[in-house]
Image (cartoon, rainbow, N blue to C red):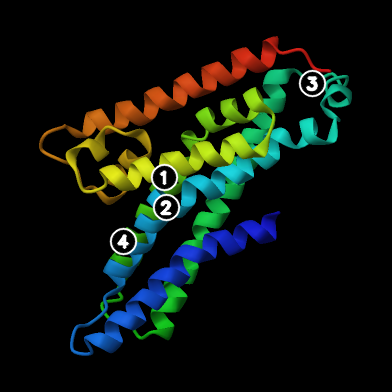
Amino acid sequence: MFLVSILGAAAAPFICFISSLAKKAKYPDVPIRFSETFSDTNLYIVLLIGVPLYGVITSYLFNREYAESTLKNLLTIPVSRISLIVSKLVLLLIWIMMLTLIAWVLTLLFGLIGQFEGLSSAVLIDGFKQFMIGGALLFFLVSPIIFVTLLFKNYVPTIIFTIIISMVSIMVYGTEYSALLPWSAVWVIASGTFFPEYPPEYSFISVAATTVLGLAATIVYFKKIDIH
């Protein structure tokens, strides 16, 4: 599963690389800059690829025991249900941040191969910061996805849910409403492209509220559910 997820993480850098090469071939006099490449790649990850990819990983981690009918045996070990959720969340955080780092490295490598311009330490740091912020915030927003996974105990509803999230995020992209939708607000926060209609606090509150509500629903449901 980890190797498959690496391929998913590589999709955004590769797509942006091919798109940049096509643009360079059509407009040879227009330079392709690293700053634009990092920004565009992170945009693809946050709005298009990240949520479905991390949703599949989340579903894999939290649905695996249900699918293999081993959860009942696992809970006979003196480990609380909360501890089980926390351990999976820690693993998920490491997984997501590793994929984010891989995507950033691939973006840099593709840029070097394509001989893009404007590479500097400031651009590298800014690009790295955008990627890490985006990855961390998307991790926080997996809590509703975890709840959906535990509720339906199946991969399909989770995948459908994440696809809907991505579609809505893309639909509101570029509008002031993207600062309010939690998943599109991730891009607004990571890129610093806030809207005058809504202060930055609105975006942070949107992400935080969704995270807390999703986590609370997950914990309450998992503590009360009967394991057969």
Position of residue 56 in the picture relative to residue 127 (left or right): right
- Residue 186 position by quadrant: top left
Disc 3 and disc 4 in contact, CB within 8 angstroms: no
Q: Earlier in the sequence, mark 3 or mark 1?
A: 3
Position of residue 76 in the picture relative to residue 23 (left or right): right
Q: On residue 79, which mark appears?
A: 3
Q: Mark 2 highlights which residue? A: 48
Please indicate, yes or no, whether residue 158 appears anywhere in the rendered image: yes
Which amino acid type is shown beneath numbered disc 1? Ser
Which circle, 1 or 4, is nearer the viewer?
A: 1
Q: CA distance from mark 3 to mark 1?
A: 35 Å
Q: Residue at x 47, y 34 (%)?
A: 140
In this rendered view, identify the residue nearer to me: 29 or 149: 149
- In what element is the residue under mark 1? helix
Q: On residue 166, which mark appears?
A: 1
- In what element is the residue under mark 2? helix
In which quadrant of the rendered image does the N terminus lie?
bottom right
